Amino acid sequence: MVNRDNYHLTKDYLKYLDGVLQLGRASVGRYRFYLRHLLIWADEAPLYKITHIHPTFSSYLASVHLDDVTAPLAPATLKKIIQTTKRFLAWAKEQHPREFRTLPAGWLGALRPPKSVPPAGEHVLVTLAEIRQLAALHIPDNDLALRRDQAAAILLYLSGMRAGALGTLSIQCVDVANRTIKQWPALGVHTKNSKSATTYLLDIPDLLVVVERWDSFVRAHLPLSAMWYTPVTIHWGEQQLSTNLPGSNRNVAIIKRIKKLYEAAGLPYKSPHKFRHGHAVYALQHAHAMADYKAVSMNLMHADIRVTDGIYAPLLGDEVKQRIAGLTGSTVTPPSAHGDLAALIRDLPDAQLSQALMMLAGRLAK
């Protein structure tokens, strides 16, 4: 029988996701499904005493079958359950420190999917070298559609935004001079879970030039309410910009157009989301302090830094090789920086401290 207090605690968490983090109904429903397994496993034991339960949560998940079918839960689902459980219990420790003082943060950090789950493969992402090849592609002035696609691909990389946001981004939301993007649902931008944020572009001058060129062009020919990734129509063989609003299949259209851009550049295709991965990895590789990591996380519109770390911590194999090879070197941090880092660590909640230390170790290994 599920512990009644545990059940009410999960309901409070789901309300927090809905009311405070403003996640969509579908997302909250998925979290409810993921947490259901924790409640069933804990049974009558209060959640702050679950370290004593046997079998362990990971072992229990390995034996779970969806709707009593013979097939076990998918590896991706198992990973989501573990990630959701960690976030939920970290939230519970913050909200109820007295009751959960006996639940060690180290136990949360050690939660892993069952061993039967295969390890994550390397991230597929758009590299800086690739995006520069796309930027260097010569496109005739009268091919407005391909010029738009080239600028859009670079904007995806510089901003880290999702394709859904790009396709619904009006001209008024883009300020290239100040390197800002208003990803505001109030202005019609479609974002994940309807989150609203002003995000920023990477400062890579040669790439910004291409974006600025297209930005100036659409501003000269369209009202501010028109789409930055505007539809292009063909009339008597001539391409023209359109003020039409994006249709329901805009994301599919963007994918098709990015494929055409890759074909024109002679490169193997990568989906629009791989530009977001490229943005994140480039930014994290150039981060020098915890404040930088936090800024990258916020720019990706993640709920907190743990989400960013969970997605992008596994770096490409070549970089891991380089980092391991460099472990014999040493890095000296200036005294003033030591004080800043110490202050940052003191301000972190317990749930994020282990993540912060792991990331710091990664930086010191460079």
Image (cartoon, helix red, strand yellow):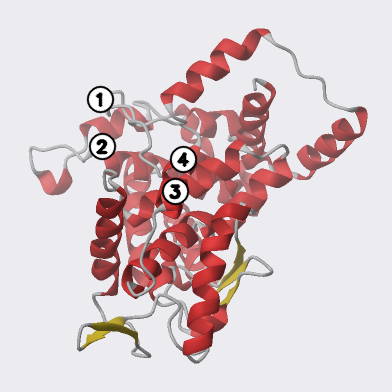
- The residue identified by callout 3 is 131
- The residue identified by callout 2 is 75
In the picture, measured across the screen, residue 102 lies left or right of residue 214, that is right
Query: How many residues crowd around disc 2 within 10 Å: few (fewer than 14), some, or many (20 or more)?
Result: some
In the picture, measured across the screen, residue 253 lies left or right of residue 346, that is left
- Residue contact at pointers 3 and 4, CB within 8 angstroms: yes
- The residue identified by callout 1 is 116
As helix, strand or loop, the secondary structure at mark 3 comes to helix
As helix, strand or loop, the secondary structure at mark 2 comes to helix
Sequence-first tag of 1 and 4? 1
Q: Which disc number belongs to residue 66?
A: none
* CA–CA distance in space, label 2 to label 3: 32 Å
Sequence-first tag of 4 and 2? 2
Q: Amino acid at mark 1?
A: Ser
Q: Give the image location of residue 228, x and y in percent.
A: 45, 77
Q: Amino acid at mark 2?
A: Pro
Give above or below for 156 relative to 248: above
Sequence-first tag of 3 and 1? 1
- The residue identified by callout 4 is 129
Residue at left 59%, top 40%?
284
Q: Give the image location of residue 156, x and y in percent.
A: 45, 59
Q: How many marks?
A: 4
* CA–CA distance in space, label 3 to label 1: 37 Å
Give above or below for 323 relative to 67: above
Which of pointers 4 and 2 indicates the residue nearer the eye?
A: 4
